[in-house]
Each structure stands twice: as C-alpha cells, then as structure tokens.
Image (tube, coloured by chain):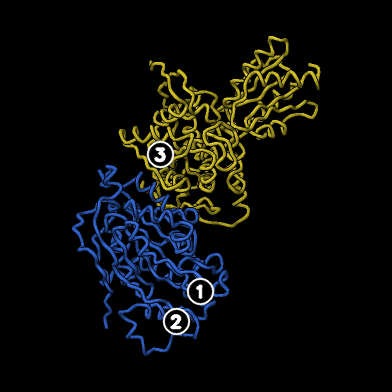
Chain colours: A blue, B yellow
Amino acid sequence: MVLEVVRKETAPTPALGTRARGRAHAREVVPVGQPTAASDEKRLLRYEMMPHMLCPGCGHGIIFEAMLRALARRYETLDDVAFVAGIGCSSRVVGYVDACTLHTTHGRPLTFATGLKLARPELEVVVVTGDGDGLSIGGNHLIHAARRNIDLTCVLFNNEIYGMTGGQLAPTTIPGAYTSTSPQGNHERPFDAAALVEAAGATFVARAQSYRSREFEELFLRSLDHRGFSFLEVMSDCTEYFARTNRLGNGADLLISQARAEPAIEEDLAGRPTLQDVPARPVRPVMPMGVLHESSRQTLEEAMGLSGDRP
Amino acid sequence: MPERQLIQGNEACARAALAAGCTFFAGYPISPSSEIAELLVRELPRSGGVFIQMEDEIASMGAVLGASLGGRRAMTATSGPGFTLMQEHLGYASLAEIPCVVVDVMRGGPSTGLPTSPAQGDVMQARWGSHGDRATVALAPGDVGEVYALTIEAFRLAEMLRTPVAVLYDEVIGHMREGVVLHVPTPEEIGRRTGPLEPFSPSFLPYAPDAHGVAGVPDFGRGYRFHVTGLMHDERGYPTSDHATVARLLERLERKLDAVVGAVPPERYRLEDASVVLVAYGIVARAARAAVDQLRAEGVRAGLLRTRLLWPVPSDAVADVVGRAELVVVAEMNRGQWALEVERLARRSVALAPYLKAGGSVITAEELADHVRSVTRDEVAV
C-alpha cells in the first residue's frame, strides 16, 4: 500500500512566488517519484573524495542520496548552491557534493551560513548539521537563526548519538538508552528538535525519516522552496554505536524500528517480528512526521532590505 | 584635502574600516569596543554594507568568516572576553585562509576583569589564544590617527595574505579623542584580495599557493566549486592526514606572514646613541616618549623603540636595537607579555628591567622615568 505522510499543517501553504536565488544553473524541477535519467544524481558527486567515511547500514547515506536526488531534479550544476556543515558524521557528507562546500567548526555552521547568506543573498545556502552539532553545542545558534527567519534551509540528521567520537550521549538520546557516556541508561529527557525550532520562530518545520527517503526528498525540495528559515529534521540510524550498544540489530532492523515509531504505519508492521525488541531496552517514541509547521513572515534579508534576486 | 577632525579612537577605527572597503560587520556588544559597532550599524547600510548583531562572539566570528567567503571585506570588534570566544574561529580562518579583521579594544582581565579600564593583557592571547601551531598578525596603534591608519593596513594585509589580522589597542586609545586627518586611502593602501589565478576546471586547486605562499581561494558562488574545511587539507582543499602534506601546509602558513614585518616597521625615537632603550607599544609608548625626553634632559642617553607590530615579532629590529643597549626597559600594561619576546631576543649581557603595570591605570612618563632612574642608580652605571 502507499503510505501517506502525516501532515499537521497549521497554516495553508502561502503563494511563495518565483524564487531567484541559486537558480542560474537550475533546471525544470522533475517531480519526485518520476524517474530521472539513470544515476542522474551521481553527476553531483565528488568522486575524488571517495571512499566516504559512513559505516555500513548508516542512515546518513540513505538521506544523503535522497538529498542528491532532490538536487539533481532541480539543478544542472551546483555553482550557486553552498552547503555549510558543522562537525560530526552528518556534517561530513557535504564534502561529497560537487558544490561550494564549507565544513566549519563544531556546532557553528549556522553562524557561517548567516554571514554567507547576508553577504550573498542570491545564493542557495543549505546547512547540514547533526543532533549533537545542531542541538547541543550549536543549540543557541539554531534558535537564533529560527528567530531571525533568515532564508536558510537547515537539515538536521538526528541519529540520537555522537557517532564520530565513539557513541556518546546526545541531547536527543531516548530515555534509558545506553551510550558510552550513559552506561547506566540515559537519565535525561531528549529535545524535540522540531518543536524547539518552531517555538523559536522558524516558518517551515518538518520531520522525515531515512526509512522513507522519497518523502524526505519531497520535504527537502519544499524546504528549499520555502522563503524563510526552513528546518528539516530527519531521523537516522547509527548502526555502529547506537544499535550495537542497545542491541537493536542491524541497519534493516533499525529502519523497521523507525517505521514502527510512526503512527501511520506502525499498525501495518505490528505483525512483523523482525525488530529485535529486548525487554527493558529503550523504545523509540511515536512522533509526528511530515510538515509540522508552515507559515509566512518577513525574512531577515527582506527586513534588512537585501535583495536575493540576481541583477 | 580632508579636514582635521576631533574623533575618538573607536570612531577612527570604524571610519578606517569604511575607507578600507569593509562591507560586513558582525559583532556582539562589549565594553569598551561598542562604539565601533554603533557607528558601523548606521554607516554600512547606506553603502550596501551589512551589519548584524549576533547571539555571541562565537557566532559573530563565524558570520564574519561566512561573509568573507562570500567575497566581502568583513570584520568584528570586541574586547578580551569576546576575543577569547573568537579564538576557535580565528584558528579556522588561519588554516582555511579566510581574510578577516578583528579589533580587540583591550580591558583589564582575566575574566570579566575591569570592563572599562585599560590594559594590554591580550598580547599573548593574540599569539597563542587558539589551539595548535598558528602564526598570527597583530597590529598595535599608538594614537587615534594610527588607529585609522593601521585599521586600513589590517584590511590590506588580511586580504592580501588571506589571514585573520588583529588590531589591538587599549581602552584609553579607544575612548580618547584627538584631532586627526582621515585621509582617503589610495588603491595601493587598500590592497586587493588574493584570489584564484585560473578559471574553474575539474583540476582546479583552490589551496595551491602563489609565489608569495598565499592560496588563491575563490569566493563562493563565482563559478568555482570547491571545498573549505578546518581539517588539514591538501591543495585540492580535501582533508588529508598525510604527514608531509600537513607539515608543508603549516610551514607555508607561517612563512607567508613574513611579509608583514617589512610592511609595519617600528618607530625609532632618539635611538642613535641610546644605551638605555625603552620598548613600548600602544598608549604606553606616549608616556615612554616623554620619559625619554625627561631622561635625555638629565643626560641619560635614552631612546624608545615603539613597535606597531606585535605579531609576527619584528625580530631583526628588536635584536638590533636591544643588541646595542646596556639597559632595556620594556614597559607594558600587563604582567609581562611582549617583554618575554624582547628577553628572547636580547643578548645575555644586557640588563633587563621591564616596567609592568596591570591594574587598570595607565603608565605615566614620571613613573617610567623614575623606574629608569632607580634601576640605573642601583644596577648599572650608564
């Protein structure tokens, strides 16, 4: 069956008008789901940066491929698209895109992106961050970027752990989960990133999953199209640390655990015993997916009188 | 011909930034530097510039670097505690070769310290504040007119050498008003950003050095697709852990700053026959000059070496002057920071008697002359 993304739209989609930024090398958008030329997105890769450093089964690879697919639908080349990332597994993926890519310091990609966007409003600026990068060390910058409603797209890969440094507790780790710095089980409540950013003033907030990369692809394109601060949280999986430490199985098992955390489809999976549920082990909460908030208000660039249109 | 104006040091700094083509400022309020931001927020938007007050100094420095990569001449201004928060991004700018100017109006520290009192406590922070081995540039103007001139020079050096340049002066210079002529800088004084030498191609190397050892990194969104990282990188800009490549990169980043020494020469005052050499910078140099005159009137062969460049150290000039002296007095408003560099460059037979004052008040000519008198009376016959 076809599974619909749960939408909790709080406002009707406003007419956004034609966007000029980053479009010098744009193409007619190919609708999601409609096949493009075989391996079309691979032309946007930097092959000389391969092999990549993601682990087998890591959700980030699925998300990254979906990002590339979305970009390939919109752009011939990425000359006017800048990717700004922080530090962590998620942030490393920007290096594999053949664009203007900026791998900054831990937690601070939104600060670099803010300067770049105000300096060059005509560029499409996409921030890639992780849950540790964006919500812990960089949490302050995240809420302020949302408050300003600067016209950036921020994609936060949430794998609920610090993968690159060896599987430590994150501000998104679910209660009770074991990590290398919570060997007794996590005592802390995790952040609801989407709710936080919506409260801070973001005008487009959505949540997706690596489990359903087509929906992510569509939401990513909508984030790019939105005028104002777009925040797209995408649930990912760390097979190497989170799954191993918590005995949650392999990459495929984790994808099913993501599916079961979504109300629209948990029923369909109720009969599937594949997930290696262990009594007293942490269970992912059910959380809403899709577009969680969409509204329209003046962007920072508009308020400052900066034109994003090309001359 | 521009007229002489009575303006404050911080105002001269902001005027210089505008004259030097600065079109982006990101900052966070902090005494005693806030006047720079308050002037630029009014002036920048009038000429297509951008001003943004960020959520903290870490964010300010990040925004400056992002804007600079976008092709803007970008700066921030702060004081000691904010300069501390900026250090990680200053290291990033050094390694990724992103031009920027940071003005640090020094106040008493450590910690919150003396927010509106003068000090020269950030000299070593400007050198070693960021982790790892990193060569830095720090200029030290001595009066309001020189704040103007050296802020323009800071932009020229930053853009040409693609490196962060710090301008360090104390609270007194920042808030003092003097009559200065704000001359319009020539294109040579403003300088040009070192950029790519060839058009984009798949084999383009954004971090290949030019003849001066500077990488011609392009601006974002100008037809070049490339990678910028705070990881050690090769000439493609891609991360590497190859030891030889990393060693070569670190050496190049240090070597390219040698050009700064010749560009910002020290001032030599009555040094021709001096056996007592005072070494000072910033506001202290004014007192030191007066002290030299007092001592000369008493028959002491005193002179002043006033450096306008703290980092890299103008080693040859210091070694030359100090090498001919019998007594060297480094005067600074801290517990002895640049004095360590002078000590390093002095030969063993030279008597060193630094005059150090940290506590929030300036060094006067009288106390400095008294210090020299007491040292010469007690320790050496000059």
User: At numbered mark 2, what does the secondary structure look like: helix, strand or loop?
Assistant: helix
Question: In the figure, is residue B150 to the left or right of A263?
Answer: right
Question: In the figure, is residue A207 to the left or right of B11?
Answer: left
| Residue placed under numbered mark 2 in the picture | A253
Marks 3/1: CA–CA distance: 42 Å
Q: Nearer the viewer, mark 2 or mark 1?
A: 1
Marks 2/1: CA–CA distance: 12 Å
| Residue placed under numbered mark 1 in the picture | A242
**How many numbered tags mark residues here?**
3
Question: How packed is label 2: few (under 14 Cα within 10 Å), some, or many (20 or more)?
Answer: some
Q: Is residue B151 visible?
A: yes
- For the residues beneath circles 2 and 1, the answer to whether they share a chain is yes
| Residue placed under numbered mark 3 in the picture | B25
Q: Amino acid at mark 1?
A: Phe
Question: How packed is label 3: few (under 14 Cα within 10 Å), some, or many (20 or more)?
Answer: many
- Image height of B61 relative to A137, above or below: above
Q: Chain of mark 3?
A: B
Residue B195 location (% of width, % of height): 44, 40
Residue A276 location (% of width, % of height): 47, 85
Q: Amino acid at mark 2?
A: Asp
